[in-house]
Image: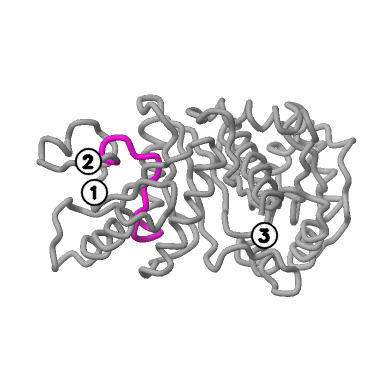
Amino acid sequence: MTQTTPQPLLTWRDIVARAQEISHKRMRRMVVAAAEDGAVLQAVADAHSQGIADAILVGDEDKIKLLADQLKLNISGMTIESVQAPDKAAGRAADIAAAGEADVIMKGFLPTSTLLKAVLLKERNLRRSEVISHCAVLSLPNYPRLLNITDGGMVVSPDLDQKLKIIENAIIVSHALGITEPRIALSAASEHIDQNMPRTLENAIIAQMGKRGQFGSALVDGPFALDTALVPGLAASEGIDSQVAGQADVLIVNSVEEGNITGKALINFDDAVFCGVIVGAAVPVSLVSRTDPPRNKLASVSIAVVLSDYLAQMEEAA
């Protein structure tokens, strides 16, 4: 039985409020790998002060305490495990999550590849999907719902099978956000199938799979250009009848470059709030950047907490 939140979450503030509601019942815990990073410590401190999550800080204890002092952050109630080498910190963080002692893994001052290598080590049994993908859930000031752009961070150029797994991961994130029947738009340069544009052919195949119900409780359609996917009425003017066009909850892109450029354009030029999470492991992986404003950091921690709660519900219902 599918578990969902009571109603769809529509903005980043809804995500934060939902995370607070979840942690009010049981405080969720993040484990931070290589926590000696100012932006990460700021995000952790803010999440703690707002009742979203506690943290276990794994990393160089002296550097963590020095950074906290410099930034005037209160981490006195947090557990610190002193592990200096980044790869060892990643392994220890993954072990903590595998033991059920953390609900979310957070990336600190280390490469994403180092962290994921530790998380996905077979012996830890933390892999849930064959494909690990990144969801950039954006809260846009002029769009009436959250928009999940995926994958702009993990799979460089997905083939058909990988794209199907990315869609499955995105559906799980949508369900965690209370969207019971997400509208999933398949991105391309044009709505028209053109043999000179291979992605239009691939996305038309996926859309046909969607029409046959192969994605369960999701509406999948395309190919669509960005404006057709997001702007109401454009598809109808082109003679396209679609339940997805103009109101997409998810935009499936064709490469890391496309997803990254689309997301950053909306963040920097349309004041979108970014909530990012890596999906496909048994626990969500949260990443924040030192250049992210505080609201983006808080939103990214919050969506990881919301997703962790949904994954726990899925496991209980299985």
Residue 74 higher or lower than 30, as above or below: above
Residue at coordinates 37% horizontally, 31% vertically from top-left? 270
Measure the alpha-carbon separation of dots 3 and 1. 37 Å
The residue that mark 3 highlights is: 110
> Residue reaching furthest bottom?
122
Is-magenta flag for residue 23?
no
Q: Is residue 70 left or right of residue 157?
A: right
Q: Nearer the viewer, residue 279 or 31?
A: 279
Which type of secondary structure does the marked residue at label 3 adopt?
Answer: loop
Residue at x 64%, y 51% (from the top left corner): 284
Farthest-out residue, front = 1
Q: Which three-letter amino acid code belongs to the residue tagged 2? A: Thr
Q: Nearer the viewer, residue 44 or 18?
A: 18
Tag in front: 3 or 1:
1
| Whether residue 282 is visible | yes
Range shown magenta: 244-258
Residue 107 visible from this viewpoint: no
Is residue 247 part of the magenta span, yes or no? Answer: yes
Residue 81: quarter of image: bottom right
Marks 1/2: CA distance? 6 Å
Which residue in the structure is indicated by mark 1?
224
**Mostly what secondary structure, the magenta segment?**
loop
Q: Secondary structure at mark 1?
A: strand
Q: Mark 1 touching mark 2, by CB under 8 A? A: yes
Q: Earlier in the sequence, mark 3 or mark 2?
A: 3
Give the residue at mark 2: 228
Three-letter code for the amino acid on which mark 3 is drawn: Leu
Return the mark for residue 60. none
250 with respect to 208 (left or right): right
